[in-house]
């Protein structure tokens, strides 16, 4: 079964063709990062306009790279939330028109479910149940994947997402947008024990995350050093901040392994590209004799292939979306 997956929830216009939820036939990603870099972050209105300009070409290229035509496609999958409403509307409207014109079934996909499914593409033998930590610019979720499309949310961020914290700290130390990869790069030149940044606990919710206190601690440190007339060592700040984020993520992942037990632990989302995070997770999982899996970096970032894979399993379970499918900016995982 060939699925065309379309993703436009933030600043990537992406489309891909995937066979049977597992085999990548094409994967086209047109990123808007160079445009938003000018403004230090994603400007929703500009993002919407760029999606409109690019979506036809991106979808055409996904079909031609897979050496298929729309006729060969069995189903169209599209992200309908969560995300920015304008960008989501471009993808959903385009997918609905295509499905209607070509008389193909349509499946609306949850963006986080897409990120989790990137692991199905990378690891063809991976099957639920497993534990998964999704860490991106918009989300930090620790979930039990009970079955395809069935999730228990153990914890999530109560304020900033981990990637958002990376982006804000990067901006504060003058590294620019998107901050995650830049913080990681410079961190290798720094000492991660140079500055002690706090790790917040959310009382009564041990699996929840909080990163805004850490972000404020970094900003306070930078201000205090400036007031004292000290020069800032950006590499030390980056390395120490990153250590705090990674420890906070890995600690909760380890708690979940100890409490619930699992054969496999997966990570997903943009921050999963981070080498320090991957290494720390790998080490922790090895200690518990748990298989650790992660998508390769191109599948960690927003892409259409992960949406096609999720749509395949939703389709198998009988889900179909109508032409009334709407963009839902705050769609909850597991909701339809
Ligand atoms: O999954 P994604 O592409 O989009 C969302 O759904 O949010 O994630 C983007 C986020 C950004 O915040 C970016 O700074 C972060 O992932 N990111 C990283 C790295 N690469 C991307 N954060 C830390 N280290 C990285 N290497
Ligand atoms: Zn994402």
Image: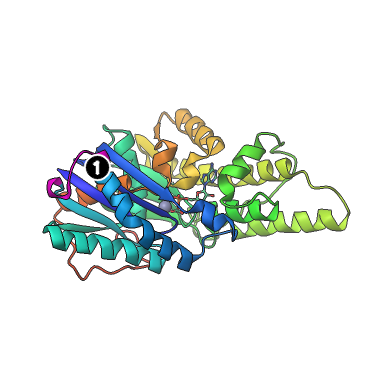
Quarter in which the C terminus is drawn: bottom left
**Residue 182 pos. (x, y %):** 61, 44
Judge left or right: residue 230 versus residue 204.
right
Judge left or right: residue 226 versus residue 153.
right
Find the magenta span and give its range. Answer: 64-72
Q: Nearer the viewer, residue 143 or 170?
A: 170
**Residue 40 pos. (x, y %):** 60, 58
Mark 1 near ligand 1 (CB under 8 Å)?
A: no
Q: Nearer the viewer, residue 331 or 171?
A: 171
**Secondary structure type for disc 1:** helix
Q: Residue at x 52, y 32 (%)?
A: 279
Decide: few, some or many residues near mark 1? Use Cα within 10 Å; few <14, some 14-19, many ≥20. some
Q: Residue at x 38, y 55 (%)?
A: 153
**Residue 131 pos. (x, y %):** 37, 43
The residue labelled by disc 1 is 64
**Residue 331 pos. (x, y %):** 35, 65
């Amino acid at each position: 079964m060939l699925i065309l997956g379309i993703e436009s929830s933030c600043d990537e216009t992406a489309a891909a063709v995937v066979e049977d939820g597992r085999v990548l036939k094409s994967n086209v990603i047109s990123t808007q990062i160079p445009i938003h870099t000018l403004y230090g972050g994603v400007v929703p209105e500009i993002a919407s306009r760029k999606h409109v300009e690019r979506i036809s070409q991106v979808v055409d290229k996904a079909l031609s790279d897979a050496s298929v035509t729309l006729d060969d496609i069995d189903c169209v999958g599209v992200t309908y939330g969560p995300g920015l409403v304008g960008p989501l509307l471009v993808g959903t409207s385009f997918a609905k028109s295509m499905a209607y014109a070509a008389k193909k079934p349509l499946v609306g996909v949850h963006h986080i479910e897409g990120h989790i499914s990137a692991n199905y593409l990378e690891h063809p033998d991976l099957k639920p149940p497993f534990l998964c930590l999704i860490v991106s610019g918009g989300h930090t979720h620790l979930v039990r994947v009970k079955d395809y499309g069935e999730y228990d949310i153990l914890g999530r961020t109560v304020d900033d997402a981990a990637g958002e914290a990376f982006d804000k700290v990067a901006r504060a130390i003058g590294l620019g947008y998107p901050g995650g990869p830049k913080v990681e790069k410079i961190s290798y030149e720094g000492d991660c024990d140079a500055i002690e940044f706090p790790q917040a606990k959310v009382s009564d919710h041990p699996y929840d995350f909080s990163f805004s206190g850490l972000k404020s601690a970094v900003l306070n440190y930078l201000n205090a050093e400036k007031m004292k007339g000290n020069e800032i060592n950006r590499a030390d700040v980056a390395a120490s901040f990153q250590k705090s984020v990674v420890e906070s993520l890995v600690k909760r992942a380890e708690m979940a392994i100890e409490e619930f037990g699992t054969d496999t632990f997966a990570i997903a989302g943009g921050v999963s590209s981070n080498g320090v995070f991957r290494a720390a997770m790998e080490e922790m999982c090895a200690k518990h004799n748990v298989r650790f899996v992660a998508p390769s970096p191109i599948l960690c970032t927003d892409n259409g292939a992960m949406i096609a894979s999720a749509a395949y399993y939703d389709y198998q379970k009988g889900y179909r979306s109508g032409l009334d499918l709407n963009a839902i900016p705050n769609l909850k995982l597991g909701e339809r």
